[in-house]
Amino acid sequence: GYACHSEVVCVPENLVVKLPDVVGFEAAAFTTLGAIALQGIRLTEAKLGESVAIVGLGLLGLLALQMLKAAGCIVVGMDIQAERAEQALRLGIDSVATEGDEFESACMQYSSGYGVDSVLITAATQSNQPVEVAGEIARKKGIIVAVGAIGMDLPRKIYYQKELDFRISTSYGPGRYD
């Protein structure tokens, strides 16, 4: 309810930050989107050297990719749009796919066959497929975080057998709802 394009906007103090002199308006325009991606990453509990899969390489997925790489993670991604996959390659993703089978193979390859440590779903679709794929590629006791608006009919069998932790990210984290 506060993200609007106006000359003057009244927002709660926890949603305001002074723009440093070294940050331009164009870069600052990505602050909220970056915070949304970062909150999803926080919930994955990803650590240096861990493998993280990103399902959906739109703007949020690409921002998350860059943060995860900067944090020393191995990142495997998927998007059905080839242009987004190509952009992910330019941004340094370890492996990217546009088809499910190729994505699952890459996740197993980059996790030595165990499955990725966590999955960040930044896709936007009514389909349940991202949740199903996430369950297949995650390791036992892995963490799956939904950032995007997706179908969420959890396939009980795979989530139960692997004891997967499914989390839903609430926007951009601490202070957002103060």
Image: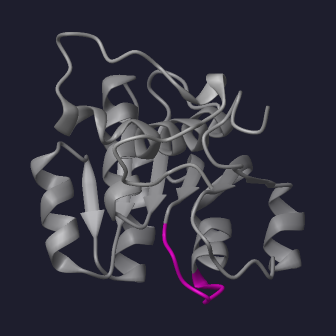
- Answer above or below: position of 43 versus 157: above
Quadrant of the frame with the N terminus: bottom right
Give coordinates of residue 41: x percent, y percent: 55, 38
Residue 131 percent coordinates (x, y): 66, 73
- Overall secondary structure of the magenta stretch? loop
Q: Is residue 151 magenta?
A: no
Q: Where does residue 15 sit, x and y in percent of width and height?
A: 58, 30
The residue that appears at 34% across and 82% down in the rendered structure is 99
Q: Visible in this render: residue 112?
A: no
Residue under the image location 20 percent in, 20 percent down: 23
Taking depth in this image into account, of 47 and 64 the one nearest to the observer is: 64
Note whether residue 85 is visible: yes
Please state the total of marks drawn on the protein image: 0
Residue 120, quarter of the rendered image: bottom right
Q: Is residue 70 left or right of residue 174?
A: left
Question: Which of the two residues, 1 or 80, is positioned nearer the viewer here?
Answer: 1
User: At 57% across and 65% down in the image, what residue appears?
Assistant: 148
Picture residue at 25% right of the left edge, 80% below the top: 81
Q: Is residue 106 above or below residue 176?
A: below
101 over 71 or under it: above or below: below
Horizontal side of residue 171 vs 16, given as left or right: right
The magenta span reads: 123-129
